[in-house]
Amino acid sequence: MFAHYVGIDYSGKGLPTQRHTAIQIFESDPAGMPVRALERSSWSREGAYRYLAERLMEQRAGGRGPMIVVIDHGLSFPLSYFREATPVKPAFASWHDFLQHFHALWGAAKERPVSTVAAPTLPYGRPTELRLTEKFTSSAKSVLNLDPRLISVAFSTHAGLPWLYELRRDFSDVLHVWPFDGLQPEAGKSVLAEAYPSLFYNRYGYPAELAKRDERDAYAVSLWLREQDAAGTLPLYLALPTLTPETREEIVPLEGWILGVL
């Protein structure tokens, strides 16, 4: 299905332009094992966005085949956030409406640290609430828990979603955001999905030079994607056949799903 398999280990630390080793990007293709993207050992959030945007532009121009990109931050919020209207936000009928709303509140995270953005929806009423897909794992954390004592997936999610908004807005002709744009992408489109690297971490050995967990997480995600595509099993994971029709039709289009969780 794909010509490139990109695993991104993400971080909400620091400034969007600040490069640090907590953000890692590894890429593989059908013929080779994962390697560091552009041979870089550290990335910024802005740099990661530009890396993906440039490759989508190449694909649009016909110079590059489709890629599947899997990133380890949440792509959505728990169902209650969609269904409950408050004085500072409406209810949302679709993920696309949610994403636009989120960008309006948190777009400043593209310019400064997440901890300095004063969104009117804070504090969240249930900061430890999990999405259904997180409940299907043994240890995934809430995307709402912005406890400043923690460096958690919540910070990565709030820092990353504004960049996702930009990618989807500018590249919807070549980019399918799974599962919100549908469970099965159109042939030839690139796909961006959510990962939980701990699902794959213990499956693999790692090159000796990859000593840090962030590096190994991105490597493992890229390798898992490559293996599943080679085996012909990626469509199975994308289709979510083990979920009930109600879950696939009513929950997944809003809360999203972690690729690899069945």
Image (spheres, grey):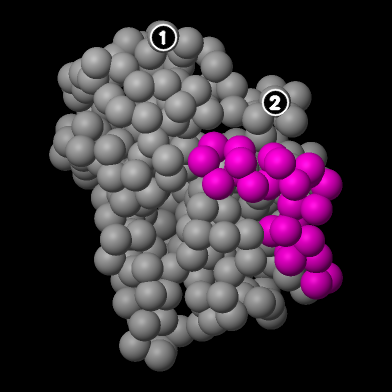
Q: Is residue 7 above or below residue 18?
A: below
Q: Is residue 254 above or below residue 182?
A: above
Residue placed at 42% from the left, 75% from the top?
174
Q: In this view of the protein, can residue 261 be seen by the observer?
A: yes
Q: CA distance from mark 2 to mark 1?
A: 19 Å
Return the x and y of residue 193 as percentages of the image width and height.
Answer: 55, 53
Residue placed at 30% from the left, 36% from the top?
102
Number of dots carrying numbers? 2
Residue 143 among magenta residues: no
Question: Which amino acid, mark 1?
Answer: Gly
Return the x and y of residue 230 as percentages of the image width and height.
Answer: 77, 73
- Residue at which label 2 appears: 135
Quadrant location of the C terminus in the rendered image: top right
Question: Which amino acid, mark 2?
Answer: Lys
- Residue at which label 1 appears: 125
Q: Is residue 253 above or below residue 82?
A: below
Magenta-colored span = 231-255
Mark 2 / mark 1, whichever is N-terminal: 1
